[in-house]
Amino acid sequence: FGSSIPVLPFNFTLVDMFRIASVLMMARADDTALSIDLNNRIASSSAGVYQGGKGVVVFNALASHAQDESLKVVPATLWVNDVVTSGRLRPSSGAGDGSPTCPHDQWNGFVDLTDICSTDPSTGDSGPWNYMQMAAVVGSNMSLVFPNYDTLQEDSWNWGVFYATEAGSVDHRCEWIENYTGWDCPGGWIDQQNGAWDVDASKVGASFYDSGNPFMNGGGGGAGCHLNLDLTVMDQTTAISSSGEDLSAASCQCNSDLSGNSWIDWVDNWMENTQVMPTLAANGWFQGGKAPSTALSLAACWVTNVRDMIQLQNALYERAKLWNNQLQPKSDWGENPQSLRDYWGWNEVPLKRSVLVDPKSWDTVVIKLPGAACYGKGQLDSISCLSSSVHAVLQVDISKWVQSGFLVPGVDNQFVKPGSSVLFVRESIDDNHAWYNEFFCEAWESPDNLWQVVSVSGGSSTQGGCYVQAPSKTLQELVV
């Protein structure tokens, strides 16, 4: 984003500062053996991009995709602190029904928007960006979703399918079938020769194929070209110049010829040379002005290597003010870190559903705070900085995870799966304007006293713990 970032937002008064300081003095963030392990797994390195930890996978186990047993892959996100974007977890909870397209003013710069972003009367928000979000974390079992895991960080590793942005890999992608020179789409088939749509209920799209790079004996699950489900035409963005095309094949893989300058060349080509199909004039961004965030889904192509994904993800963030019109969601990116919460900064990695939905694969369930939750740059963020209304939404979300069987409250369940283990995650920004995640634990009690988080400090010699339980102690007693 390039602009300097002050420690405090413009409307931050001395009264606010003392209030937040007093809250933070009472709050205590603890390390546990698990939080230390996960922080090591996502650590960046001065040796270069993706030379530190291999990262962890986060996944919304309550998403509708997760419940669909017919799918072979579901969308997940890879967290590693080589990624510098804000907004690294796709929201699903909060105002606007948790939709990442909210808030907006019924206009994205090109077309009228018909969906309504519901307003939370207790906060005044009509988007999800100031709320906490929950997800399952896979760290110690990453080898179950990435083949040849030991060599994952090598440039020669190319077994995967990775999108640097939101991509619609499960519900909006058509799988290229080389033997039949056409695309298997959700609900139909598109022939390459004539481009016609043939309705065919037996065709199910890219999510019904096994995971992995289709050109390396993988199934190609989630790898494909974006489909407009309403018009039944592929609306994958193409950007062609004398330097090359953004796509390298009919499978809509990214063209590595444009990977120069850490994939900045790909982003610049997208902005300068996007082609507009006559039937999709509503997607006429760049020729008609900057694009909304939703343009990322249509432009997203896939790469086979984690490092390429990270660099493309960061390149899009670096150029964000040049391509994004900040209308969907409605944004006002400024110098204060909190204004950057609503950037679409997550990646999308279609991975094996049977592994991700199994709690035995998880290390824990995380509760991610909004970026820079306590103002400032976020290094000391605590759940105590957030309003009681936001806490009330988290109370409901925890209840949903408990009702689903993915969380089983109680001290006796903290080391079993599914169990009661949880951790908080803060999203902070450093002096180089790079965001990073950090796992930690903190004692907490929900507003209606339905749930408590118990924090037991640990480290290299003691395990500690962080778990959800039904109320039995006072908040002071929850810190052990």
Image (cartoon, grey):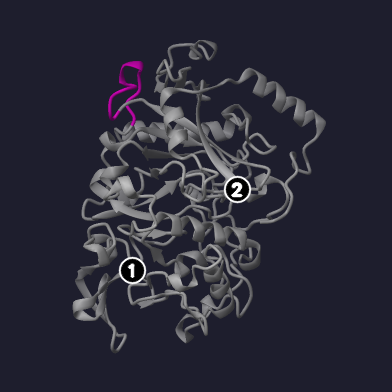
Three-letter code for the amino acid on which mark 2 is drawn: Arg
On the rendered structure, is 114 left or right of 467? right
Above or below residue 461? Residue 440 is: below
**Is residue 237 at all visible to an observer of this figure?**
yes
Tell me the quarter of the picture where residue 469 sits: top left
Observer-nearest residue: 377 or 93? 377
Above or below residue 375? Residue 308 is: below
Magenta stretch contains residue 83: no
| Disc 1 target residue | 224
Q: State the image coordinates of residue 276 (x, y, percent, origin top left).
A: 51, 82
Tell me the quarter of the picture where residue 428 sits: top right
Residue at 45% across, 59% down: 308
- Write the start and end of the magenta stretch as one range: 407-418
Q: Which image quarter is the N terminus in?
A: bottom right
Observer-nearest residue: 454 or 305? 305
Task: Name the residue at the front extreme.
Answer: 47
Three-letter code for the amino acid on which mark 1 is drawn: Gly
Mark linked to residue 341: 2
